[in-house]
Image: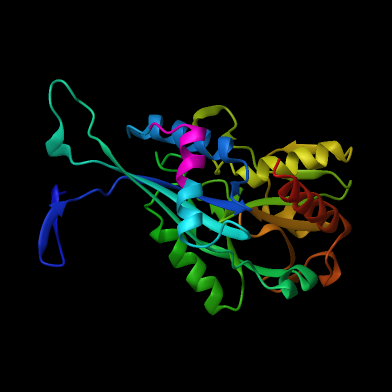
């Protein structure tokens, strides 16, 4: 791949390798900022991107940006993006290229209330999760396949698409969310982050909201299992839930033609969503 591209008639360095974090801010404070930074830092180390940013630095950047956009008093959607710097800037003294860092903020526009009241419809993606891909499990800017699958889901009048592994057909995640089920015993289950027995292969993204939901469930005395899930597990589930920073906890009431929980939002979804909203309000 070439190191330069033409943008608006000007030759600039190509910065294709990158990571991003989608975050939620309320009254000027980013929810779970430390965890977002820790995830980006770990991914940057794994992918050879020289990313260093402290929580205090991010807070200062966020305050400046939110104030400039008039968003300090309400809710905002923030995106932190870091891309690999110009390889031509590499020297013997500085062997790692510098990075480009961008933070954006827009007014929070979440999902419609009807989606939480009636539940979301999902489809199975025709594309497959590849745990052997070095980008798997990282929030990489190489996201076109996810956007393509999501667009196809929307054409099918669904809100999301579920990804399964190519070989064993295990559930991995959705295009932009982690997946939970409430099994027949009332326990919460979600795919593990790593492939069992293959610790160098990631199965799904270590979602920040995923972690919040697991903490909430534990506090509610609900058993949480990280285990491999199949199509049969999904079809037999009492409830299916999607989680990410923007949707929070989203109930799924239909998977293609199959109704989940009789097509009604389940009790667990309501409890976890309420707990998530309380955590947001507390900022912790």
Number of marks = 0
Residue 169: image location, x then y, percent: 58, 50
Residue 74: image location, x then y, percent: 63, 60
Question: Looking at this view, is 108 or 73 the one in front?
Answer: 73
Q: Residue at x 22, y 34 (%)?
A: 97
- Eyeballing the image, is 137 above or below 122? above
Residue 137 shows in this picture: no
**Residue 43 occupies which quadrant of the picture?**
top left
- Eyeballing the image, is 232 above or below 7? above
Was residue 105 drawn as part of the magenta stretch in this picture?
A: no
Horizontal relation, residue 49 to residue 219: left or right: left
Specify the segment rendered in magenta.
52-61
**Residue 270 occupies which quadrant of the picture?**
bottom right
- Which secondary structure is most common in the magenta stretch? helix
Question: Looking at this view, is 59 or 79 the one in front?
Answer: 59
- Eyeballing the image, is 24 above or below 55? below
Residue 250: image location, x then y, percent: 71, 61
Q: Residue at x 39, y 34 (%)?
A: 44
Residue 266: image location, x then y, percent: 85, 61
Was residue 57 drawn as part of the magenta stretch in this picture?
A: yes
């Amino acid at each position: 791949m070439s190191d330069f591209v033409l943008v608006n008639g000007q030759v600039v360095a190509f910065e294709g390798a990158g990571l991003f974090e989608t975050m939620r801010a309320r009254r000027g404070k980013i929810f779970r900022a430390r965890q977002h930074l820790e995830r980006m830092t770990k991914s940057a180390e794994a992918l050879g991107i020289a990313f260093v940013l402290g929580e205090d630095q991010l807070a200062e950047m966020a305050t400046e940006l939110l104030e400039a956009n008039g968003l300090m008093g309400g809710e905002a959607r923030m995106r932190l993006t870091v891309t690999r710097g110009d390889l031509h800037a590499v020297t013997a003294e500085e062997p790692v290229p510098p990075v480009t860092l961008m933070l954006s903020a827009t007014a929070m526009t979440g999902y419609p209330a009807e989606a939480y009241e009636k539940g979301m419809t999902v489809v199975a993606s025709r594309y497959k999760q590849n745990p052997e891909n070095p980008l798997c499990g990282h929030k990489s800017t190489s996201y076109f396949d996810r956007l393509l699958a999501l667009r196809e889901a929307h054409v099918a009048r669904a809100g999301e698409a579920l990804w399964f592994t190519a070989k064993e057909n295990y559930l991995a995640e959705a295009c932009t969310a982690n997946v939970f089920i409430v099994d027949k015993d009332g326990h919460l289950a979600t795919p593990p982050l790593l492939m069992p027995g293959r610790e160098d292969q990631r199965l799904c993204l270590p979602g920040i909201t995923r972690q919040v939901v697991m903490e909430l469930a534990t506090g509610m005395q609900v058993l949480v299992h990280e285990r491999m899930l199949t199509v049969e597990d999904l079809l037999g589930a009492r409830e299916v839930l999607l989680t990410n920073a923007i949707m929070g906890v989203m109930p799924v009431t239909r998977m293609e033609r199959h109704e989940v929980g009789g097509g009604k939002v389940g009790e667990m979804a309501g409890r976890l969503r309420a707990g998530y909203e309380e955590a947001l309000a507390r900022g912790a």
